[in-house]
Image: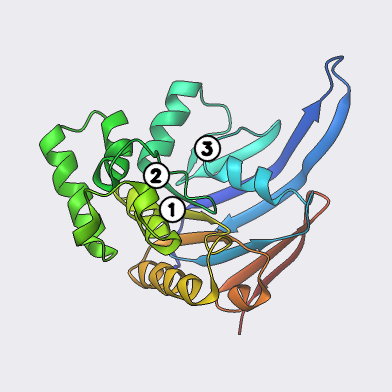
Amino acid sequence: MSTTATPIIDLQSLFRDYLRDDGSLMVRALDDVNLCIEEGEYVSIMGSSGSGKSTLMNILGCLDRPTDGRFLLRGQNVANLGDNELSFVRGREVGFVFQSFNLITELTVLENVEVPLFYRGVHRNKRHELARAQLERVGLRDRMDHRPNQLSGGQQQRVAIARALVGDPSLLLADEPTGNLDSTTGEAIINLIEELHAEGRTVIMVTHDDQLAARVQRVIKLRDGRIDVDRIND
């Protein structure tokens, strides 16, 4: 675990409320969450449906904002940033790996991986260079010109991982990354994620799988929007 003075993530008295049209409280998805994650940690977030884990991941990924509280990302309070500022931070600090892959079917594998760089304004030649390097990194050198529907589920998830890494983010968020894969393919994907962590990347993974959670450094379990368990694995 890193011993840096400033954690990569520092949540302070974080709340996320969803309101009815009349302004009354409908759901308190996160309820006074306090959490620090050091750079280089490998963490799983667990909890039953409605526990708040998806809301927490959306906030950590700068896709949503808390209703109240502070979210320090590398020491910067991003809780109250405007849309453009939040998008800027998200594009440079966060990589996402989703259960459903979220690839664009009309684009080739190479073009899918280039998408985050396109939105950052990276020159076409540089986009190609960086995307090719990441696809080679995940073992898809010979699939760059294929479309997503020409790939297996495991190959599609590797494309998603390459896309998540192409911008060299400091934080990798994986939401049930093996949920749509068979056990053998899922094991290969988890091995790849563990390699990325071993290289020093901070990884936060949502999972329902106790066996996967046993492989991370730290397990955080949510219940009714609160942290119920925060333990270090032996």
Please indicate whether residue 55 sits to the left or right of residue 171 in the image. Answer: right
Of 144 and 11, the residue lying toward us: 144
Q: Between marks 1 and 3, how big is the CA–CA gap?
A: 11 Å
Q: What element carries label 3?
A: loop
Q: What residue is shown with label 1?
A: 171
Q: Between marks 2 and 1, how big is the CA–CA gap?
A: 6 Å
> Please, what is the three-letter code of the amino acid marked with disc 2?
Glu
Residue 157 vs 24, above or below: the answer is: below
The numbered mark at residue 88 is none
> Please, what is the three-letter code of the amino acid marked with disc 1?
Leu
The image shows a total of numbered marks equal to 3
Q: What residue is shown with label 3?
A: 62
Q: Position of residue 62 (x, y in %)?
A: 52, 37
Q: Residue at 74%, 60% (x, y): give it.
A: 47
Q: Where is residue 157 in the image (x, y as percent from the top left)?
A: 42, 57
- Asked whether the residues under the numbered discs 2 and 1 touch, taking CB atoms below 8 Å apart as contact, a structural biologist would say yes
Judged from this view, the residue extending furthest toward the top is: 22
Are there few (<14), some (14-19), or many (20+) residues within 10 Å of tag 2?
A: some
Q: Position of residue 67 (x, y in %)?
A: 71, 30
The numbered mark at residue 93 is 2
Q: Is mark 1 on a helix, strand or loop?
A: strand
- Asked whether the residues under the numbered discs 3 and 2 touch, taking CB atoms below 8 Å apart as contact, a structural biologist would say yes
Location of residue 217 by image quarter: bottom right
> Please, what is the three-letter code of the amino acid marked with disc 3?
Cys
